Amino acid sequence: MAKALSEILADDVRAALTAVLGDAARGADPLIRPSDHADFQANGVLPLAKAVKGNPRELATRVAAVLAPAAGAAADAAGSAEAGTAAGAEDAEAAAETVPTSGVIAAVEVAGPGFLNLTLTAAALAAQAAERLGDPRLGVPPTAVGRTTVIDYSQPNIAKEMHVGHLRSTVIGDALVRLLEFDGRTVLRQNHLGDWGTQFGMLIQYLVEHPEARPARAEHSGEAAISWLTTLYRDARVLFESDTEFADRARKRVVTLQGGDEESLAAWREMVAESKRYFEDVYARLDVRLVDADAVGESFYNPYLAEVAADLEKRGVAVWSEGALCVFFEDIKGPDGDPVPLIVRKSDGGFGYAATDLAAVRYRVNTLKADQILYVVDSRQALHFRMVFEAARRAGYLPADVEAVHVQFGSVLGTDGKPFKTRAGKTVRLIELLDNAVDHAVATVEEKNPGLPAADTRAEAKVVGIGAVKYADLSTSRTKDYIFDLDRMVSLHGNTSVYLQYAHARIHSILRKLPAGTEVRVHGELALEPAERKLALHLDDFGATVAAVIENFEPHRLASYLYALAQTFSDFYENCPVLKAPTDAVRENRAALVELTGETLKLGLALLGISAPDQL
RNA sequence: GCCCUCGUAGCUCAGUGGAUAGAGCACCGGACUUCUAAUCCGAUGGUCGCAGGUUCGAAUCCUGCCGGGGGCACCA
């Protein structure tokens, strides 16, 4: 597996720092960063000079001399070169022979207060590209093999439409699943369906009393399924609120359902099955990996709730207050200044969702063996998760070596900056939203490519439209609210998935047109033009980007990387002809860069859950 | 009241304690017998909410304000 150039440089600079300063530099971070002034810059000399009370420029000069003796000595001609003492230079030269470096550095320059500007050899850039090209992982090693993540996302409610809030959880969760799996983790998807609660008494009672509410035909689509369930929900609620006798029967129905009554359970199962049919349709359209087997709803934990509550009480984690079994926290108080509890068991004897979440934590740790549990949920639930995690820690359900993270995200707003709703003020159905996105894309594809058969246009528009919706969600930072603007996301300009898909398609167009017999391979001996150098450098940063994304669960960093890659490629595309390259070697070398760019775009988009066709 | 979160160009957003804060959109001016113009190049546009502090160095870290959004006892 390929080490990134930034890592190679970090090793080299660390070795040089150690050669000059000895143990004082042992654990120091050289702070290698991309630079406007060279290929990379090392910022780590300054803090180190501070630590040893040295002159930073002098130290930088000595380190430069170790890294590239000839280049380092020459580079400091300007500025305070006279301060670079003779003794320092001698030390450095003596040390240089004992410091093995990678040989990737062509030139080192001391700049500003003590930065090291590092320029790489063309051969090093070529070697990196050669190592990544053709490797399905592009040279990025998996770092988390043998570890297990449980990720809880999507979480739609039975008998209810999915809406834009579910979209964010589903899309972000799906991208994280792909990224974590790429990193070698075992990822267990958990779709924590809202499949339990008092509203089912009302629904079941209505269904029992009105069997005709079901659809006439047994064979029907997911959309038809959610359609009748929505009607059922609406009608049942109307009756519940207007007819007190029905409301009484509905409340009794909750009790019989929880008591295991077979007729009630059958109706409940029917609604769950119908809803799942709809969810699977939506997931298929979204091209996300959630499947039926991932559905582990709230009801799954019912058998454990009483035991969890009793256990919490026994351990002294939970106490009775105002008739409810509660967990209290030092620093969590309500508006009146009184502490606010996490309610495990309500005063009517029922269990709240806190009990379910605690049971789920225990199950995920003990049975699923997770060492990382992620909850991709709306940021409004931040306090709830804080309390659940803290309570689980106290109870020992969440050991210190298991990480639990609320991967929170902001609300979806309309273009007016208010919560995203229809003109009538209702929540937007997810299906409708996706239809709109695809319709937008159809219009654009037709405009660009009017000759395309209707079926192909439709297929292309699906890839473009769905990708656009997902990318719009993934390309802004997760924690912020984001503005849902279809025109913008399907506009095909700027930082959109379509721009990236188009760049990828153009790449394949070039590759298809290469003269027969052209070898796509790197020629290490060639000098590189600025655009080629920039492209090669950016390609090499893919692995570090993915690592950063996984570290903080921030898919938008990958989106930014890919957009910058496409822009860097555009510059290359304008300035470095491939098919009309001056020599065969240059053409082959450029073709290699083109292919690696295409592979990087494709893999990067795939990790976000977006497909990149070879042609658009 | 307390807690969380956000505040960067007219708009939508990036920005690992590093040098001159960047994209896109919009607007203006250019480039299509081309490797896909679904593109590219250039110009305009900033008291990084405010004030302190830490630091050689702060949009970034700390504190306090101001403003938006969210949350705070039996719904999930």
Image: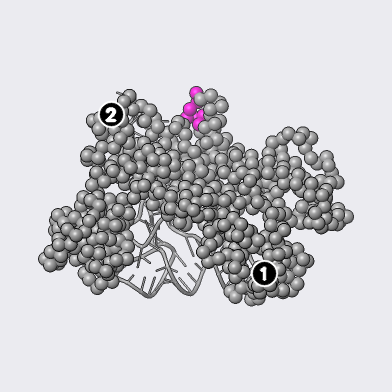
Q: Is residue B41 above or below residue A459?
A: below
Q: Nearer the viewer, residue A447 or A210?
A: A210
Residue count near mark 2 (Cα–Cα under 10 Å), binned few <14, some 14–19, many ≥20? few
On whether disc 2 and disc 1 are found on a single subunit, the reply is: yes
Q: Are marks 2 and 1 in contact (CB under 8 Å)?
A: no
Q: Is residue A345 visible?
A: yes
- Frontmost of labels 2 and 1 is 1
Q: Nearer the viewer, residue A16 or A43?
A: A16
Q: CA distance from mark 2 to mark 1?
A: 73 Å
Q: x%, y% of residue A506?
A: 40, 33
- Decide whether residue A98 is among the magenta residues: no
Kind of residue at badge 2: Lys
Q: Residue at x 28, y 61 (%)?
A: A14
Residue that mark 2 sits on: A580
Magenta-highlighted residues: A445-451
Q: Is residue B75 above or below residue A264?
A: below
Q: Residue at x 44, y 39 (%)?
A: A602
Q: Earlier in the sequence, mark 2 or mark 1?
A: 1
